[in-house]
């Protein structure tokens, strides 16, 4: 297991971050927050794939006043993303927001900062300081000549100081830019200077596949170094895909697991079935499952049987046929390539039924059993 830096614990609604809490998966809606129905529908879609915190853009008072209506219909904590206008922060706090993403140095005079900080403190609402390379203060750009890790950290510490001077400690910090290397260096530097929980991400990472690669590289390095308490994969894509990619990054480092791991070979001249199509169909069929298990979809006799045996459920394909393994043992042989997918999905369903039955027995016999244990393994 990777050793993670232990940071100060902060509660966002009922969800703990930092401290001994697991690394949390976060996303952001791209709906108009004033459209309550559309925003709620998107948040529920995010919940279904494992999103644990969601951020909403609050552009005006109507958006701020929609917060309580949205919160009444969803299950996960909500963070308001606010820039420059302290009044929006005050309204969101009155509406029951769970967290604020607002840079205190950018919301006006001292009395305006005092009002927001005092209200957040009284309500127990954390504040995330979010530094973005694209909106760095002008004096820091002049000082450093460009966006640098040092400039980003200096910006963050300015805002931290404003909160600390007001005896406010429920702080989370993020430092993001589109450069993977600058982002990594900025978080490394900040992590050496503060003990607040860090929200990590590569911002403006790009379209689905390019952004996935950049995020996996950048976040993977930070997580491997023990840095990060929440993460968002920022993609020019459906926010649901952000959450799915985030969970795969966590799974690849054996930090947390959710849903099935699908193992499939890259194909070669030995492959005698349409493995690419089969593996994609399996992935689509299982994309909304939350149970943790592994499925191998293999296409030849060299590595196929071995990989299939190592997975919870595996298929090793041959010419117009395949062998299905369950927990390392041959379960059945399937004739006809068209029958491989339905046969494999049927065996997966049976496997999960048996697994869920065993879990219910475990729960009944162990009063101290916590379902989240299975996600932390």
Image: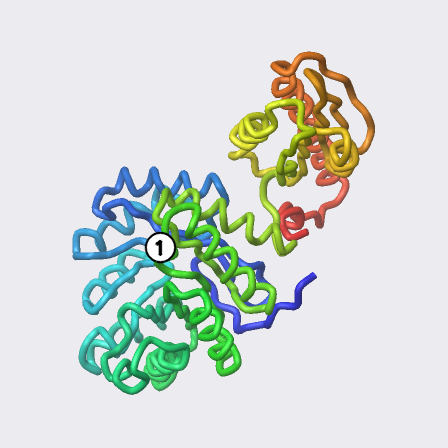
Is 99 drawn above or below residue 291 in the view shown?
A: below
Helix, strand or loop at disc 1?
strand
Q: Position of residue 351 (x, y in %)?
A: 70, 28
Residue drawn 74% across the image and 37% down it: 307
Residue extending furthest toward the front:
269
- Choose between 102 and 215: the one closer to the eye: 215
225 sits left or right of 359 in the view: left
38 sits left or right of 2 in the view: left
- Choose between 151 and 63: the one closer to the eye: 151
Residue 306 lies in what quarter of the image? Answer: top right
- Choose between 288 and 18: the one closer to the eye: 288
Is 364 drawn above or below residue 231 in the view shown?
A: above
Residue drawn 37% across the image and 62% down it: 99
Task: Determine if residue 112 is in view.
Answer: yes
Find disc 1 in the rendering and name its residue.
55
Task: Determine if residue 163 is in view.
Answer: no
Residue 13 lies in what quarter of the image? Answer: bottom left
Q: How is the image coloured?
A: rainbow
């Amino acid at each position: 297991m990777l050793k993670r830096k232990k940071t100060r614990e902060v509660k966002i609604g009922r969800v703990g971050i930092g401290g001994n809490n697991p690394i949390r998966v976060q996303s952001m809606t791209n709906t108009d927050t004033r459209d309550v129905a559309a925003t709620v529908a998107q948040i529920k879609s995010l919940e279904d794939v494992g999103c644990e915190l969601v951020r909403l853009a609050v552009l005006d008072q109507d958006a701020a006043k929609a917060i309580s209506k949205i919160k009444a219909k969803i299950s996960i904590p909500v963070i308001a993303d606010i820039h420059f206008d302290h009044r929006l922060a005050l309204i969101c706090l009155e509406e029951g927001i769970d967290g604020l993403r607002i840079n205190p140095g950018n919301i006006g005079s001292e009395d305006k900062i005092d009002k927001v900080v005092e209200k957040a403190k009284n309500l127990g609402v954390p504040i995330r300081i979010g530094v973005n390379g694209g909106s760095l203060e002008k004096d820091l750009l002049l000082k450093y000549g460009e966006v640098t890790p040092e400039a980003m950290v200096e910006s963050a510490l300015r805002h931290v100081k404003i909160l600390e001077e007001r005896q406010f400690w429920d702080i989370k910090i993020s430092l993001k830019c589109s450069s993977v290397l600058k982002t990594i260096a900025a978080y490394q530097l900040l992590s050496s200077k503060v003990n607040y929980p860090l929200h990590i991400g590569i911002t403006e990472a790009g379209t689905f596949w390019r952004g996935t690669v950049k995020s996996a590289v950048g976040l993977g390095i930070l997580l491997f170094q023990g840095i990060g308490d929440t993460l968002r994969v920022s993609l020019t894509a459906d926010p649901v895909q952000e959450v799915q990619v985030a969970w795969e990054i966590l799974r690849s480092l054996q930090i947390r697991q959710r849903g099935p791991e699908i193992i499939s070979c890259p194909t070669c001249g030995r492959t005698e079935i349409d493995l690419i199509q089969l593996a994609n169909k399996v992935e689509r069929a299982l994309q909304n499952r939350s149970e943790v298990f592994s499925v191998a979809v293999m296409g030849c006799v060299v590595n196929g049987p071995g990989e299939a045996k190592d997975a919870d459920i595996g298929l090793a394909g041959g010419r117009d046929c395949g062998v299905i393994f369950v927990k390392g043992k041959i379960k059945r042989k399937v004739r006809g390539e068209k029958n491989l997918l339905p046969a494999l999905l049927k065996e997966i369903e049976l496997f999960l039924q048996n697994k869920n039955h065993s879990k219910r027995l475990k729960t009944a016999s162990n009063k101290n059993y916590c379902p989240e244990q299975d996600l932390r393994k």
